[in-house]
Amino acid sequence: MFIDPARKFVYLSPPKTGSYSIHGYFGYNTGHPEPLLHHMGAREAIAHFPEIQDYFFFSVVRNPWSKLVSAYKDFTSRRGTQYSQRINFGKPLLSEFKSFEDFCLRLGDSHWFSDIFFRPQIQSFYIPNGNLIN
């Protein structure tokens, strides 16, 4: 997420949607915060920063299948046990799945389903009253 108080806008950063590039475009290169802060949805952002509720919100949405494949590949081939800069697991990420097919079939029954990297992108766009951002 990127907040620009001067121009009164908020860029929401759902995971795996090019947020590094967009942050760089706006000059926000001060490091990558932890996923729950960086990928905060509108509801969480307004709860933490109530002054932004009247700002303009925008985001990038990625094809859900492409996003799922990208996240799976990232977690299984690049990250190892490192979930984020501060969080490491004692075993490889997604190690409970035997293959990508197994992951797809069992994701909905796993703890990963509610993880910020795998939750549906639309959840990022709800505001506190339960409506979608206009």
Image (spheres, rainbow, N blue to C red):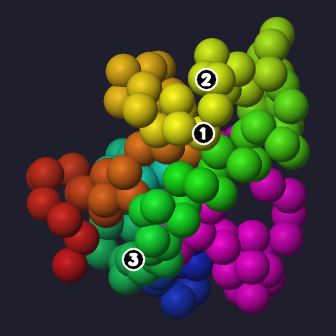
- Quarter of the figure with the N terminus: bottom right
Residue at position x 59%, y 55% in the image: 69
Q: Are marks 1 and 3 in contact (CB under 8 Å)?
A: no
Amino acid type for the residue under numbered disc 1: Phe
Which residue does the numbered mark 2 point to in the structure image? 97
Callout in the foreground (1, 3): 1
What element does badge 3 sit on?
Answer: strand
Q: Main secondary structure of the magenta part?
A: loop
Q: In the rendered image, is residue 55 in sight?
A: yes
Q: Please name the amino acid that badge 3 sits on.
A: Phe
Q: Is residue 1 above or below residue 108?
A: below
Q: Quadrant of the C terminus?
A: bottom left
Q: Nearer the viewer, residue 61 or 75?
A: 75
Task: Name the spot of residue 127 as percent of width and height, x first.
Answer: 24, 57
The alpha-carbon separation of the residues under discs 1 and 3 comes to 34 Å
Q: Secondary structure at mark 1?
A: helix
Residue 72 magenta: no
Q: Amino acid at mark 2?
A: Phe
Mark 1 or 3, nearer chain start: 3
Q: Are marks 3 and 2 in contact (CB under 8 Å)?
A: no
Q: Which mark is residue 28?
A: none
